[in-house]
Image (spheres, grey):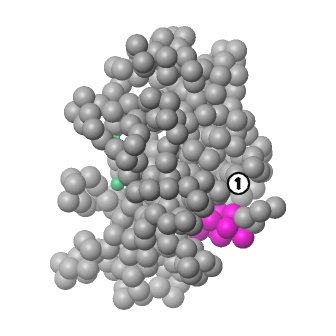
Amino acid sequence: MAYEKEKEIAIAAVQAAATVCEKVRAEMVPEAIEKSDKSPVTVADFGAQAIVCKMIKDAFPNDPIVGEEDADDLKTPEMASRLAQVTNYVKVVLPDATDEQIPGWIDQGNGDVSPRYWTLDPIDGTKGFLRGDQYAVALAMVEDGDIKVGVLGCPALKLGDRSGILFVAIRGGGAMMMNMDGSNPEKISVTSSSDIPNFRFVESVAHGDQDLHARIAQAAGITTDSIRMDSQAKYGAVASGNAVLYLRLPSAKYPNYREKIWDHAAGVLVIEEAGGKVTDMHGKTLDFSKEPRFVDTQGVIVSNGEIHDKVLAALAN
Ligand SMILES: Nc1ncnc2c1ncn2[C@@H]1O[C@H](COP(=O)(O)O)[C@@H](OP(=O)(O)O)[C@H]1O
Ligand SMILES: [Mg+2]
Ligand SMILES: [Mg+2]
Ligand SMILES: [Mg+2]
């Protein structure tokens, strides 16, 4: 099948990063370091980005990586002990790593959107990670604006008998979910709107306009309360048929917020290959060919496909 090597390396990289994130959560109370935009980052975000960038660059040296984090905040002398913590955790999966190498590995994620590139969110849902809730390691490869490979590691996600779920999609090859170690793979697809127990919607804990979400979901016929969940685990919930809709509409506090490509790329492919649909709030396709932030679209609507037009119509009113 196409993109076999990309798939294999992406899975290995996400698994390695997720192992480290889980270890950080098990061994310490991860501390939030404040970034210049006031959002949090942790030792685990840095470690996960270092690991994934290193593994992707070893296999595909010419592919740029557009990652969320950069190492500037780790390079100052005051941060030496923090850097040492990052290195120690990276060593769990890459035993030869040194303090000198880590910032460079992280900064390999400072690439540009290009004809072929990878985009990485080392921890999507850092707030969820800090709270002990959901988070995801999200990695995707994009060619000519089209997402070809998407891997979403959700170590804390429980669905049915599974605990810790890896979602993997290849363009044209369908979407799968499996245990974090790759065992017990299963093809997934979105569910129909007549599946009453799963006719429900998911939304972020921290972001988006929850009042508007409730009104729009109701207009689309969903009468139950939302499930609130951090990270792209929400895409996994819809792709595996555990919900029919994920709403992410700009909140009144940040009406002009532009979504970032790494918060969506892997999830979008998983949904599309599971038979669902993703657009912005006006029905426009998300454009992965331009900038790290979507310039032409606002908000994100993810659905089983069946109810998509109804949701867009409700939003247009
Ligand atoms: N005002 C805002 N509106 C929508 N998303 C926002 C936002 N501010 C930050 N985000 C993004 O929301 C992501 C988390 O999504 P969710 O709330 O669904 O868990 C964050 O990813 P990180 O946690 O990787 O920084 C961040 O990029
Ligand atoms: Mg962040
Ligand atoms: Mg994110
Ligand atoms: Mg992140």
Query: Which of the pair 198/163 is nearer the observer?
Result: 198
Identity of the residue drawn at 40% across and 57% down: 292
Q: Which residue is mark 1?
A: 170
Reply above or below: 203 against 309.
below
Asked if residue 125 is positioned above or below residue 99 in the image, the reply reads: above
Is residue 300 a member of the stretch shown in magenta? no
> Which residue type does callout 1 highlight?
Ile
Numbered disc 1: secondary structure? strand
Q: Which residues are magenta?
A: 5-13
Q: Is 107 located above or below residue 186 in the figure?
A: below
**Taking 173 as reference, is 270 left or right?**
left
Q: Quadrant of the N terminus?
A: bottom right
Q: Main secondary structure of the magenta part?
A: helix
Residue 174 at what x, y percent from top left? 75, 46
The percent coordinates of residue 200 (x first, y second) are 56, 21
**Number of marks:** 1
Q: Quadrant of the C terminus?
A: top left
- The local crowd at label 1, few if under 14, some if 14 to 19, many if 20 or more residues have their Cα within 10 Å, is many
Q: Residue at x 62, y 47 (%)?
A: 269
